[in-house]
Image (tube, grey):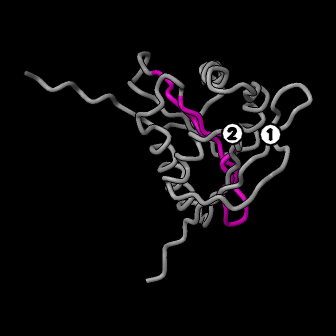
Amino acid sequence: MSAQPQATLAVLPLRLVDLDAVLLIEQQAYAHPWSHGNFVDSLAAGYEAWALWEGRGQQARLLGYFLAMQGVDEMHLLNITVQPAQQGRGLARLMLDELCARSRALGRLQIWLEVRESNARARQVYQRYGFAEVGLRRAYYPAGPGQREDAILMSLSLEEPAT
């Protein structure tokens, strides 16, 4: 018996030409997805924007993406999404690893994010990764006509512990 070849995964810069595929995933994953304009504005602003691809060339398929904004000594994760059919494979962890590596390379000491209070699955992923719940942003997210949902503020230190 021969072993199955491992799928090739690559994290590459997110480009404008990728946005149709990004928007398909965004609309599958969220009741209140980012708009095309949100992504275009983020790319134009020079935010860290990366896409996770499986395969190569014309056969490559987008599995997920993340966007983060640099601040003074910190990075703010704005959006991280894995295609719903691909969740549970450790892809969010892989992208978080990439975000941390890129953040450290840029001299950032902390990563911040907001997550919907109702998104228990994402909160669990972040907590297992090492993020701590540090605050609450009331009525942060849209939740339907005339409704808002609170966000949990989470952070992760990138500083090496003292020895």
Secondary structure beneath label 2: loop
Q: Is residue 99 above or below residue 145?
A: below
Residue farthest to the bottom? 163
For disc 2, the marked residue is 118
In this rendering, the count of numbered labels is: 2
Main SS type for the magenta part?
A: strand
Q: Is residue 36 magenta?
A: no
Q: Nearer the viewer, residue 152 or 92?
A: 152
Q: Which residues are magenta?
A: 61-82
Q: Is residue 117 above or below residue 134?
A: above
Q: Quadrant of residue 7?
A: top left
Residue at 50 percent across and 37 percent down: it is 12
Q: Is residue 118 above or below residue 56?
A: below
Q: Is residue 120 left or right of residue 89?
A: right
Residue at 67 percent across and 62 percent down: it is 74
Cα distance between the residues tagged 1 and 2: 8 Å
* Numbered badge on residue 149: 1
Q: Is residue 88 left or right of residue 113?
A: left
Mark nearer the N terminus (1 vs 2): 2
Residue at 27 percent across and 30 percent down: it is 6
